[in-house]
Image (tube, rainbow, N blue to C red):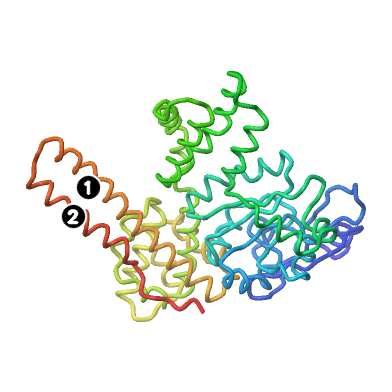
Amino acid sequence: MKDSEIYDMFRGRIVIPIFDVTGRVTGFGGRAIERDAMPKYINSPESQVFSKRSALFGIDKAKRHITDMNEVFIVEGYFDFISLYQRGFQNIVSTLGTAVTEGQLTRLRNYSDNITLMLDGDEAGVKSALRLIGLFSEMDINGSMVVLPEGHDPDSFVRKEGIEGLTRVVKEKKPILDYFFDYAKNKYGVDKLEGKMRFIRSVMPHLETIRNGIHKRLYVKRLSELTNLDEQSLWDGLQEGKARSVSTEGSSTSIIGRRVVGVLVDNIDLLRMCKTKSVIDHIREDDVREVLTKLFDHFETNKEFTVHKFVQALERDDLRELVLSSVMSIADYDELESKKVVADYFTYLERNFVREESHRITERLLDAEKRGDEAELMQLLHQKRQILELLKVGSMEKVDHG
C-alpha cells in the first residue's frame, strides 16, 4: 500500500501506534475524531507482523502490571485504555475496536487466568461477553464482567467519577454467566410460563459450554431454584444439547497447540524442560501431535537443530505449512510469554489425561461397590489415590517466569 493511500485511509482520525509485547511497532490504529464518523476504528492492513485479531493495545506497558496483580481488564477502545492507565488503573489492555478474539485471550492467558471484560451494559455488550463463556471454560479462564452505568464507556466514566468511582464499580464485577442470569431474568421474567421458557432457552446453551463439573452443577442448581424445575429435567435438557457442542471441542486447545509448535521450533532449548514426551500422546489434534512427536525425535537424534532442517525432514506439505505458520504466529512473543505458553500447555495435557483417568476409575468404583467386590474396591481406591496425587505434579520442571 502506498503512503498516499495510507494517509487517505487514516485521514480524519487520531493515529496511534500499536506495539507488540517487546515494544516494537507492528501497525497503526486510527480512531475517528468526529462522533458520527464511520467506521469509528480503522487499523493498518493485515500482514505477517500485524493482525488486529491477535493484537492488544497497551500490552507492552501493562504486561508486568497484569502479572503482578494476576488480573487483566479488557476495554474496547484506545481512549479507554489511555484514560484508565494515566489514572493508575494499569492492569488493562484494549482491543483494536473489535470484539474480543480467541487469539487475544490466548495471549492474555500467558499472563493471568483472571480476565475481566469492562463493557457497556447494553444488549450488544452482553452478547459480546456471552460468546466468550465457552472459550473461557475451554481455556480455564476465570472470566468476569464489569458493567458500567448506561451511557458511559470507561473513558467517559472515569472522567466524570474519577478512579474512586471506577473502583466502586469494579468491586461489583460478576462472573459472566452470573451477570447473564440476572440480565435474562429481568428481561424475560420467570413468573409466567412463557417468560420462564424463554429464560431457560436463553441460558441453557451457555451451560452446555461449561466443562468444569462443579461449576455446571452450581448453575443447574441455581436455574432449578429460579424456575422451580427439578434439576434432573434440566440435566436431561443439557444431555440433549451435548451433541451440538461436541464439534466445537478442542478449538481453543488446537490454536494453543499450534503456538506451542511455533515456540518450541523457534526455541529448541525449551524442549529440555519436558520430563517426558509421552504426554504428547494425549494431544487430540492429529497434526499438532504428529509435528511435536517428530520434533522430539528430530531433537533426540540430531545434535544440531535448525528450523530449515526440521521442515525439510517433514514428509507432508501440510505439516511444513503448520510449522512455518506457527513460527510466524509467535514472532513477537517475549521469553516470559514463550515459557509460560509451553508450560501451561503440557500441564494442561497431563492434567486433562489424569482427570479423564480419574473419571474412569470412579465409574469402575461405583460398579465394584454395586457388585460388592471388596478386593477390586480396595484396588481401585488405591489407584484413585495415586491419580489424585498425580494431579499435584506437573509435566514440566519448574520454570522461572521472571
Left or right: residue 137 versus residue 2 is left
Circle on res. 383: 2
Q: Earlier in the sequence, mark 1 or mark 2?
A: 1
Q: SS for tag 1? A: helix
* Nearer-the-camera pick, 253 or 59: 59
Image-quadrant location for residue 8: bottom right
* Nearer-the-camera pick, 399 or 90: 90
Q: Amino acid at mark 2?
A: Gln
Residue at the location (83% across, 51% down)?
40
Mark 1 crowdedness (10 Å alpha carbons): few <14, some 14-19, many ≥20: some
Q: Amino acid at mark 1?
A: Ile
Left or right: residue 273 versus residue 89 is left
Residue 331 vertical placement versus 137 (above, below): below
Q: Position of residue 149 (x, y in %)?
A: 77, 48
Location of mark 1 (residue): 361
Q: SS for tag 2? A: helix
Cα gap from disc 1 to disc 2, whole angstroms: 8 Å
Q: Position of residue 200 (x, y in %)?
A: 55, 28
Q: Position of residue 151 (x, y in %)?
A: 82, 46
Residue 311 vertical placement versus 210 (above, below): below
Residue at the location (70% across, 44% down)?
125
Q: Position of residue 378 (x, y in %)?
A: 12, 50
Residue 323 vertical placement versus 284 (above, below): below
In contact (CB < 8 Å): disc 1 and disc 2: yes
Mark 2 crowdedness (10 Å alpha carbons): few <14, some 14-19, many ≥20: some
Left or right: residue 73 versus residue 240 is right
